[in-house]
Image (cartoon, helix red, strand yellow):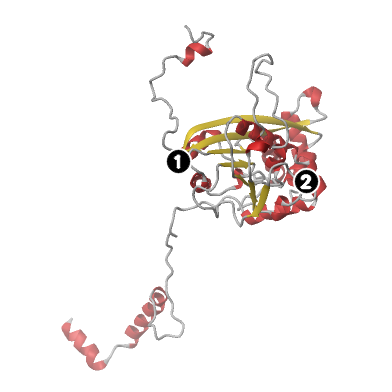
Amino acid sequence: MAQRRRDIEDNGPTSLQVFVMRLFASILRPHFRRCSLSPTPLCRHYAVQAPGAPTLEVFNSHVKYLQKERAAAHAEQSRQADYLKDEIAQRLVDRLLDISREFPKVLDLGANSCNIARALAKPPLPTPEIPEDLPRAPKKPLSQRIHELVCADTSPGMLQRDNGLEEPVVPLTQQVLPSLETLPYESGTFDAVISSMALHWVNDLPSLLASINSVLKPDAPFIGAMFGGDTLYELRASLQLADLERRGGVQPHISPLADVRDMGGLLGKAGFKLLTVDVDDIIVEYPDTFALMQDIQAMGEGNAILKSLGGPIPRDVLLANEAIYRELHCKEEEKERIPATFRIIYMIGWKEAPGQQKPLERGSGQVNIKDILEGGGLGT
C-alpha cells in the first residue's frame, strides 16, 4: 500500500482515478457549502421551528375578510340575512343582563355589523319557565349600565355597514383590527368582553382566549357565542354524498368547528374561572338548499378553509345535493321546505381575582343529583 502511494505521488493519478475523483466530486458538491469567496455560494437549508408555540392554520383569514366585505357591499341583502346573528346577539345580551353591576368599558370582539349594540336597545327575552306571579326585582337596562362599547372587527365594510341608520343607544367606538388573533389592548383594559359569532374563524383559539383573559380587569366576565360542531350537519352530509356520487371523492365545503366538550378545557387553560358552557340548537327552515347557501353567503359565513380547492360547486353536484338533502332530512309531509340546524355554543368565564367566589371541592356535596333527577326532592 505504501509503495502504491509513492507511485501515485511520483507519477500522478491515472486517468481512471481522475475520472472516479471527479465523479464523486460532482455528486457531493451540492451538499457542501462552497468557499465564502465564491460569487454564488451553495448551502443546504434546514427546517427550523419558529419561536413560540406552533400554530395550525385551518382558515384563510384573507378569504374570510373578502367574504365579509362582499357581503357588506350588498347591504340590504346582508341585513335580511342577519336574522340569525341578531337572535344570537339577543340571547347573549340576555346572559349579560343577569350580572348586576356597572360596565364602564366593554369590548365587542368580532362585532360584525354591531349586532350586540342593536340587541342592547331591545327589551329582555321572555322567560316562560319563571311564573309571572313570582316577585322579581326590576333590573336596570344594560343600555344604562354600559358606559362605552368598543366594537372591533377585521372588516371595515361590515363594521360600518349600518352607520347611516339610527344610532345605537349605547355610546360606541368602532375599531378595525388587522386580526382578531392579536389584541392591541393593554392588560386590564375592559370590564367585560363579549364575542358573538366570530370565534369559530380563529386559527389559534387557545392563544386568543388567553389574550382576552389578559385584557380583562380582575373579576370581569367573558361571554361568547360561536357555531359548534354539528352546525349544518344536514348540508355537510348531503354535499359529501353528492360529491361522492358525481365526482367519486369528497371535498371540504363546510368549515370544521369546535365541539362543546373542548370549550370548557380551553377556557380553563386560558385562566378563566367559574366556567359555564351550554349549547343551543336553532333550526331554521328554507324553501331549498339554494336559498340556504345564498343566506350563508349573505351572512359572510361561507367556507374559508385554507386548503379548500376554491371555486363554485359544480352544477351537477348542487342538483344532486338538493335531492339527497330532501330525501334524508325532510319529513314526507314537509317536502316543500328543508330544515337547517345551527348549533350555538355559549360560554361564560371569569378572570381570577382575590376574594372571588370559588366552587366547592369535589366530593363535598350533600345532595345526590341522581336522586333529584329521578323525581326526588332536596328533602329526600
| Viewer-nearest residue: 116 or 331 | 116
Task: Give the class, few, some or many, for how many residues have Cα within 10 Å of label 1's Cα (few <14, many ≥20).
Answer: some
Q: Position of residue 160 (x, y in %)?
A: 73, 52
Q: Give the residue at the far bottom of this rendering.
A: 10
Mark 1, residue position: 271
Is disc 1 placed on a helix, strand or loop?
loop
Q: Position of residue 121 (x, y in %)?
A: 72, 37
| Viewer-nearest residue: 374 or 346 | 346
**Kind of residue sitting beneath label 1:** Gly
Say whether disc 2 or disc 1 marks the residue closer to the N-terminus: 2
At x 19% / y 88%, what residue is drawn? Answer: 6
Q: Is residue 250 positioned above or below 12 on the image?
A: above
Q: How many marks?
A: 2
Is disc 2 placed on a helix, strand or loop?
helix
Q: Position of residue 339 (x, y in %)?
A: 74, 31
Mark 2, residue position: 78
Mark 2 and mark 1: Cα distance apart in space: 37 Å
At x 31% / y 88%, what residue is drawn? Answer: 14
Quadrant of the rendering where the N terminus is positioned? bottom left
Q: Give the residue at the far left of this rendering.
A: 2
**Kind of residue sitting beneath label 2:** Ser
Q: Is residue 149 positioned above or below 288 on the image?
A: below
Asked whether the viewer can see residue 137, the reply is: yes
